[in-house]
Image (spheres, helix red, strand yellow):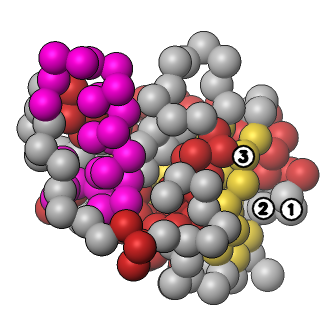
Amino acid sequence: MTIAIYPGSFDPITLGHLDIIERASKLFDKTIVAVLRNPNKSPMFTVQERLSQIRLSTAHLSNLEVDGFNGLTVNYARMRNARVILRGLRVLSDFEMELQMAHTNKTLAPEIETVFLATSKEYSFLSSSVVKEIAKFGGSIDQFVPEHVALEIYRCYVKTQPGSTPTLPALDLKSNRSETDPLL
């Protein structure tokens, strides 16, 4: 069984991330979306919130697991018996950084391969940072993230910026509420 780890902060998860996740689920026996707990960053959402957002977004994928981790990705991959670290590439500048990271990981864990998937062209410009910046200034992010994630981002900016009035999308919360999802 080939297990792939798709590590990242996913703060927030975007449609570009989901594109990679859905394609990976067709390539590998099991894919683990691994949310990094990075103490050097100030995330918009807690790790638990991000795990819930990803689980809700990927509930239709039966060979997918969502988990959080600390430390080096290669150590986590070893612990989970993964042979592949999956990385998405948007633009050429991503490749330079990702290749350096892949070489470092290969030095630390020669038995683990890094596999790059090019993001679909419609998401080549999209990043979590871009989504947060658009939302921060009151722009619509509905076409960049799942609907439940957009709603959480809008709520976050309404709370943190009292003068800001982003437009909240019409959403029937009852139909999107999950018994196990603390976010909704």
Residue 102: x percent and y percent?
58, 40
Q: Is residue 178 visible?
A: yes
Residues 168 and 13: in front is 168
Mark 3 or mark 1: which comes first in sequence? Answer: 3
Element under disc 2: loop
Which residues lie in the magenta part? 141-165
* Gap between marks 2 and 3 measured at Cα: 15 Å
Q: Which residue is mark 1?
A: 81
Residue 149: x percent and y percent?
37, 53
- In the image as oriented, which residue stretches furthest toward the front? 174
Element under disc 3: strand
> On screen, 61 above or below 150?
below
Q: Which residue is mark 2?
A: 82
Neighbourhood count class around disc 1 (C-alpha, 10 Å): few under 14, some 14–19, many 20 upward: some
Residue in the picture at 61% in, 55% down: 182
Q: Are marks 2 and 1 in contact (CB under 8 Å)?
A: yes
Q: Which mark is residue 68?
A: 3
Choose mark 2 or mark 3, whichever is in front: 3
Q: How many marks?
A: 3
